[in-house]
Image (cartoon, rainbow, N blue to C red):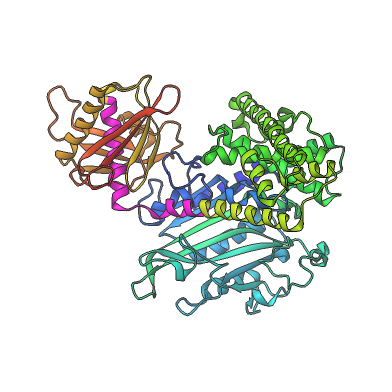
C-alpha cells in the first residue's frame, strides 16, 4: 500500500460512516498570528470543538499536511519528521468512545490489514480528580478478545498484555497540558493511543543508552511506534478544581500517514515508505553508499530527505528564507540539509537540489505548478549558505591565527550568526592541530540546549495561544477586519482582496492587494466609513450555505484559501444605506469566526499605520478604543 492509496482508503472508510470530508488547512495559517504552522488536523477545528457550529456537520474527516518546528533537532532517527501528514476524523457532540475505538480498529485490521498481534494500546490511568478510563478499557478488551486486566506502563512490557495505563503526561489532552495546569472553564479529556510493535528482534535495548531501562510502549528506543490517538474531550474544569462532564462530548482523532505506512511495511524505519524511498535511494546512489549499513550516515540521509521535503512544502505555500518566523525555520531546514550532505559526501560540492527533490514532485503532483520557483529558492539559499560558511570559516581561522582561545561561546556565536556547524568548527581546528576543550564543548552544548528549549517553548506557546485566544477583544478586532475589508473596497475599488491578517490583543493588521500607497485622504475616508458602520450598530448575522451560493451572493473569501462545500457566511447589515450606497448589506464574507453580534460593541476604530508588504500589496495597522495603542 502506498501513501496515495492509504489517504484514499481512510477518507472513504469514514465517509461510509457518515463523515463529510473537509479540505486541509494551509500549512501556514493565513489568519493566525499566534502560530507559525499548522501542526495538526485539529488546529483548524478548535472553534468547533469549543462549540461553534461547523457548516459541514458533526462528523468530519480529512488529511492534513502538518509541520512541527520543535521536532527539527529530533530528526535523524527512524520515526521523527518535521513535515508529516495527519489523517483525522472528528465527532462534534455526536458519537463517542463506543463508536470511535471500534471504527479505528476496523480500519487498521480490516482495511490496512495490520497484524492484530502487533497492536497494543494505552489509556488514561486516572488521578484524584478524574477516574480511570474504564469505558475505553472495556471496549479494548472486547476488541482484543482478552480478559487480561490493563497493566501500568511503568511496569514494562509484556506481550500477553494488550492494554497499558499511563498518567496525564501521556494519556490526556487539553490546550494547557495536564489537568492541574488547566484554567477554570477549559475543556479536555483522556486519550487512547495505539502502538505497533516491530518486535524484540530489533535488540534495541542492548545498546548503552537503553540497556538498563525497562522497555515499554512509550519508550524512546524505537521498537514501538504510535500510529494513532483518539482524544475524548469530555470534561470542563470547575472553580473548585474539580471536573464536570460536558453535555456534548467530542472526539478528535489523529493518525500519522507515514507511521501507519511503516507499520503496514512492518519496517520500523518510516524513511523506507514510498514518499521517501526514491529520495533516499537517490542520495545513497550519489554518495555511493548502501542505506541501512552505517548509523551516522543513515542519520545524515534521513535529515536531508526530511528537511528537503519540508522545505519544498513551505516554499510551495509562499514561504521564503529569511531571519524571521516561518522564513527562519525554512532557512534552518535548507542549511541543515546542505551541511548534512557535505558531511555525508565529505565535500562542499554542488548540492543538485533539482535531482534530489524531483521525487517529491512525483509524490505530490500539486507541486508541479511552482516547481521551477521552488528549485530557484533552494539554489539561492544554498548559495547564501555557502557564503555564510566561508565567512564563518574566515572568522574562525583568523581567531586561530591570532592564537585566540576558541571558547564555547565563540563556537556558539559562529553557529548562531553564520550557521557555522559545531562539527565543522572541530574539523577546521583539526586542520591546525588544535581541539576544543571539554569545558568549552560543554559551554557550547549548554548554549545550544538553551537555544533548542527557546525554539520548542516558542513553538508550543504559539500553538497554545492560537487555541486559547477567542477573547472578546480578539473577537471585536476580528469583526473590525470585516468592516475594514468592505470599506477599502468601497473607497479604493473592487480590486482590493485580503491576502493576510494578524490580530493581537492590542491591534489588527490587515494585508490587501493595492498597487500604490494610500493617500492621507483615502486613509481618513476608510477610517470614517468603518466608524459610521460602528455607530449605526449594524447586526452581524451568520448563515450556512454552499460555497457556490455564497459566491453568487457576493460573499468575499480569503485569497487562496481552501473552503469546504458548505461554509459559514457572515453578513453585516445596513438597514438604511446612504444615497448612492450599495444596498442593505455593508459586508458579506465567508469566515469561520469569531464575531460580535452588533457593530456598536466594537468602539472607535483608528488606523495607526499604512505601509507596503510586498509588490502590489499594502498593510494597515489599526486598533479599537480601549487599546493602549489608541
Q: Residue at x 25, y 29 (%)?
A: 487
Q: In the displayed structure, would residue 248 be above or below residue 270?
A: below
Q: Is residue 483 visible?
A: yes
Residue 154, position as x, y percentages in the image? 65, 75
Q: Which SS does the magenta portion mostly show?
A: helix
> Between residues 253 and 423, which one lies in front from this camera angle?
423
Q: In the displayed structure, would residue 558 be above or below residue 219?
A: above
Please indicate whether residue 620 sits to the left or right of residue 97 in the image: left
Q: Residue furthest top?
A: 515
Q: Which residues are magenta?
A: 460-489
Q: Residue at x 59, y 26 (%)?
A: 370
Q: Residue at x 78, y 46 (%)?
A: 426
Q: Residue furthest front?
A: 402
Please indicate whether residue 16 sits to the left or right of residue 282 in the image: left
> Between residues 22 and 289, which one lies in front from this camera angle?
289
Quarter of the image where one finds residue 240: bottom left
> Between residues 509 and 57, which one lies in front from this camera angle?
509
Residue 476, position as x, y percentages in the image? 27, 46
587 within the magenta span: no
Q: Residue at x 56, y 63 (%)?
A: 101
Please indicate whether residue 114 sits to the left or right of residue 47 in the image: right
Residue 297, position as x, y percentages in the image? 81, 46
Residue 407, position as x, y percentages in the image? 70, 50
Q: Quadrant of the image for the C terminus?
A: top left
Q: Is residue 310 visible?
A: no
Quarter of the image where one finds residue 570: top left
Q: In the displayed structure, would residue 611 be above or below residue 57?
A: above
> Between residues 232 and 499, which one lies in front from this camera angle?
499
Amino acid at each position: 500500500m502506498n501513501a496515495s492509496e492509504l489517504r484514499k482508503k481512510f477518507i472513504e472508510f469514514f465517509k461510509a460512516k457518515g463523515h463529510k470530508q473537509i479540505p486541509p488547512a494551509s500549512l501556514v495559517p493565513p489568519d493566525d498570528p499566534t502560530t507559525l504552522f499548522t501542526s495538526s488536523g485539529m488546529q483548524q477545528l478548535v472553534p468547533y470543538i469549543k462549540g461553534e457550529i461547523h457548516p459541514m456537520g458533526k462528523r468530519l474527516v480529512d488529511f492534513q499536511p502538518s509541520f512541527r518546528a520543535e521536532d527539527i533537532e529530533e530528526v535523524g532517527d527512524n520515526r521523527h519528521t518535521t513535515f508529516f501528514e495527519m489523517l483525522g476524523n472528528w465527532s462534534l457532540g455526536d458519537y463517542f468512545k463506543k463508536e470511535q475505538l471500534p471504527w479505528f480498529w476496523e480500519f487498521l485490521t480490516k482495511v490496512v490489514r495490520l497484524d492484530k498481534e502487533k497492536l497494543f494500546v494505552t489509556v488514561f490511568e486516572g488521578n484524584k480528580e478524574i477516574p480511570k478510563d474504564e469505558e475505553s478499557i472495556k471496549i479494548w478488551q472486547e476488541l482484543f478478545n482478552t480478559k487480561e486486566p490493563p497493566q501500568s506502563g511503568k511496569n514494562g512490557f509484556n506481550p500477553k498484555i494488550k492494554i497499558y495505563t499511563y498518567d496525564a503526561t501521556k494519556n490526556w489532552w487539553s490546550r494547557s497540558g495536564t489537568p492541574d495546569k488547566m484554567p477554570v472553564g477549559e475543556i479536555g479529556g483522556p486519550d487512547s493511543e495505539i502502538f505497533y510493535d516491530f518486535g524484540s528482534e530489533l535488540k534495541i535495548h542492548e545498546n548503552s543508552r537503553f540497556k538498563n531501562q525497562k522497555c515499554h510502549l512509550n519508550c524512546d528506543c524505537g521498537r514501538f511506534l504510535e500510529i494513532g490517538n483518539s482524544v475524548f474531550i469530555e470534561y470542563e474544569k470547575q472553580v473548585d478544581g474539580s471536573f464536570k462532564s460536558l453535555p456534548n462530548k467530542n472526539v478528535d482523532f489523529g493518525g500519522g500517514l507515514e507511521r501507519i505506512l511503516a507499520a503496514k511495511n512492518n519496517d520500523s524505519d518510516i524513511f523506507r515508505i514510498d514518499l521517501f524511498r526514491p529520495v533516499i535511494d537517490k542520495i545513497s546512489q550519489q554518495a555511493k553508499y548502501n542505506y541501512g549499513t552505517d548509523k551516522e550516515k543513515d542519520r545524515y540521509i534521513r535529515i536531508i530527505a526530511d528537511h528537503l521535503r519540508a522545505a519544498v512544502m513551505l516554499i510551495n505555500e509562499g514561504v521564503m528564507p529569511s531571519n524571521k518566523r516561518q522564513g527562519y525555520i525554512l532557512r534552518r531546514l535548507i542549511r541543515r540539509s546542505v551541511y548534512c550532505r557535505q558531511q555525508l559526501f565529505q565535500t562542499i560540492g554542488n548540492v543538485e537540489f533539482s535531482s534530489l527533490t524531483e521525487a517529491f514532485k512525483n509524490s505530490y503532483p500539486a507541486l508541479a505548478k511552482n516547481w521551477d520557483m521552488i528549485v530557484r529558492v533552494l539554489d539561492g539559499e544554498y548559495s547564501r549558505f555557502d557564503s555564510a560558511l566561508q565567512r564563518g570559516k574566515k572568522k574562525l581561522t583568523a581567531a586561530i591565527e591570532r592564537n585566540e582561545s576558541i571558547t564555547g561561546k565563540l563556537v556558539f556565536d559562529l553557529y548562531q550568526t553564520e550557521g557555522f556547524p559545531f562539527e565543522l568548527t572541530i574539523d577546521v581546528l583539526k586542520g591546525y592541530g588544535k581541539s576544543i576543550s571539554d569545558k568549552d564543548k560543554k559551554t557550547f552544548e549548554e548554549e545550544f540546549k538553551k537555544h533548542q528549549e527557546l525554539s520548542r517553548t516558542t513553538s508550543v506557546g504559539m500553538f497554545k495561544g492560537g487555541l486559547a485566544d477567542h477573547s472578546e477583544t480578539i473577537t471585536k478586532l476580528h469583526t473590525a477586519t470585516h468592516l475594514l475589508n468592505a470599506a477599502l473596497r468601497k473607497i479604493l475599488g473592487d480590486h482590493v482582496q485580503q491576502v493576510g491578517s494578524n490580530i493581537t490583543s492590542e491591534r489588527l493588521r490587515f494585508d490587501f492587494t493595492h498597487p500604490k500607497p494610500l493617500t492621507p485622504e483615502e486613509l481618513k475616508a476608510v477610517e470614517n466609513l468603518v466608524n459610521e458602520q460602528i455607530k449605526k450598530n449594524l447586526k452581524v448575522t451568520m448563515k450556512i450555505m454552499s460555497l457556490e451560493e455564497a459566491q453568487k451572493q457576493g460573499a468575499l473569501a480569503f485569497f487562496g484559501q481552501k473552503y469546504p462545500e458548505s461554509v459559514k457566511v457572515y453578513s453585516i447589515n445596513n438597514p438604511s444605506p446612504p444615497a448612492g450606497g450599495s444596498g442593505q448589506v455593508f459586508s458579506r464574507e465567508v469566515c469561520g469566526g469569531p464575531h460580535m453580534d452588533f457593530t456598536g460593541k466594537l468602539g472607535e476604530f483608528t488606523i495607526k499605520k499604512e505601509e507596503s508588504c510586498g509588490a502590489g500589496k499594502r498593510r494597515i495597522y489599526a486598533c479599537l478604543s480601549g487599546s493602549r495603542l489608541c
